[in-house]
């Protein structure tokens, strides 16, 4: 009988420990950290919900902010297939979910160190230069991810996947994290730089929300488009059948056939995203960088008392 593996600690113990750490640290901060009264503005940022939303609309209507929002909302379309679909496709090709989750562990120290290193290059007057320089490398890594998905069934054997395949996956994800954090820290630095200090909290929240939305909506669309872009053929069935819809696939199976993928929509998305991403980088990227040259007056909100 095989020996039962015993973990060092259970999940409830893990959650209890870090929950206690969280409570203790936040309590210490609440009691020991004192506010600097000299830095607190005499005037409140907003007077209520209505005033807050009125302020947000006045910020968005400023030409510089509106240009930033439109550009940042379209800047991450080129990464959508790689970011949203790659993990699912690797699982579909047989890579165990637990192995993919385990591969994320080496990324943790990298994610801690990267902002400290990158912040040295984004602390100056032109943080978006780092964003612009990192973008083409992140786009090319999208092709690398597509190659990893294509390569997976080629190297798969009865015992799973060879160690060198996981090594390539870890290296690819590490390079991806470098480009991702270079762009992320650059955007955060730019948002902090242009935010009006009198309404810094509301201003920063708006810019960061738009930046996050610029990465979320393309990922949602990419997930939705994978199946429609996938081409399947009915093979082995009697008569002429297709696999264009779910009902047609059931008819193919009932006729003794099976739906075989001839063109995976993920690869179509990878190529399309690469083209769209480089088109944005080439045509709109320089305009995005020029936002750094706008004076502070272009970003200051004109509020009516």
Image (cartoon, grey):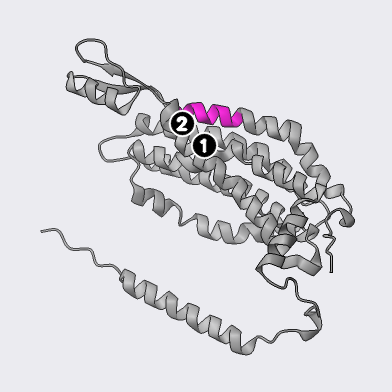
How far is mark 2 from mark 1, CA to CA? Answer: 7 Å
| Element carrying mark 1 | helix
From what the image shows, is residue 181 above or below residue 11?
above
Residue 261 at what x, y percent from top left?
Answer: 35, 23
Taking the spot 23% from the left edge, 22% from the top edge, the residue there is 251
Residue 305 lies left or right of residue 248; in this view the side is right
Residue 91: image x %, image y %? 36, 41
Residue span colored magenta: 265-274
> Is 196 placed above or below 28 here?
above
Q: Toward the viewer: 179 or 58?
A: 58
Q: Residues within 10 Å of mark 1 (few under 14, many from 20)?
A: many
Which residue is more in the foreground, 239 or 293? 239
| Residue drawn at the location 26% of the way across and 16% of the way down | 235
Q: Is residue 233 above or below residue 187?
A: above
Q: Estimate how packed mark 2 is, as few (under 14), some (14 to 19) or many (20 or more) residues with alpha carbons within 10 Å.
A: many
- The residue lying toward the viewer, choosing from 67 and 159, is 67
Nearest the viewer among 296 and 188 is 296
Residue reaching furthest to the bottom: 31
Residue 174 visible within the image: yes
Give residue 194's quadrant in the image. Answer: bottom right
**Residue in the image at 34% along x and 75% along y:** 13
Say if the magenta span includes residue 269: yes
Q: Which mark is residue 81?
A: 1
Q: Which residue is mark 2?
A: 266
Quadrant in which residue 202 is drawn: bottom right
**Secondary structure state at the residue bearing disc 2:** helix
Rendered-image quadrant of the N terminus: bottom left
Question: Where residue 220 sits: x, y (%)?
Answer: 50, 42
Placement of the C terminus among the 4 image quadrants: bottom right
The image's mark for residue 297 is none
The answer to whether mark 2 and mark 1 are in CB contact below 8 A is yes
């Amino acid at each position: 009988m095989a020996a039962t593996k015993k973990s060092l600690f259970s999940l409830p113990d893990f959650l209890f420990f870090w929950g206690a750490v969280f409570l203790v640290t936040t309590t210490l901060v609440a009691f020991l950290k004192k506010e600097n009264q000299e830095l607190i503005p005499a005037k409140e940022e907003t007077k209520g919900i209505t005033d807050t939303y009125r302020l947000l609309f006045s910020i968005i209507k400023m030409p510089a902010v509106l240009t930033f929002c439109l550009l940042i909302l379209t800047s991450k379309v080129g990464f959508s297939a790689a970011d949203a679909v790659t993990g699912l496709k690797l699982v579909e090709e047989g890579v165990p979910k637990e192995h993919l989750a385990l591969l994320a562990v080496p990324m943790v120290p990298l994610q801690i160190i990267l902002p400290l290193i990158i912040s040295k290059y984004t602390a100056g007057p032109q943080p978006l230069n780092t964003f612009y320089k990192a973008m083409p490398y992140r786009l090319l890594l999208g092709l690398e991810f597509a190659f990893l998905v294509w390569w997976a069934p080629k190297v798969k054997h009865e015992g799973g996947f060879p160690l060198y395949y996981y090594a390539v996956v870890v290296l690819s994800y590490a390079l991806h994290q470098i480009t991702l954090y270079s762009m992320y820290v650059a955007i955060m630095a730019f948002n902090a730089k242009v935010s009006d200090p009198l309404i810094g909290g509301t201003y920063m929240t708006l810019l960061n929300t738009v930046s996050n939305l610029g990465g979320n909506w393309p990922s949602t669309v990419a997930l939705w488009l994978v199946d429609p872009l996938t081409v399947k053929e009915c093979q082995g069935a009697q008569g002429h059948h297709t696999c264009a819809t779910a009902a047609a696939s059931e008819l193919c199976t009932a006729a003794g056939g099976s739906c075989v993928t001839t063109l995976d929509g993920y690869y179509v998305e990878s190529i399309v995203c690469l083209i769209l991403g480089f088109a944005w980088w080439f045509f709109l990227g320089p305009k995005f960088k020029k936002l750094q040259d706008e004076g502070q007056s272009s970003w200051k909100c004109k509020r009516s008392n």
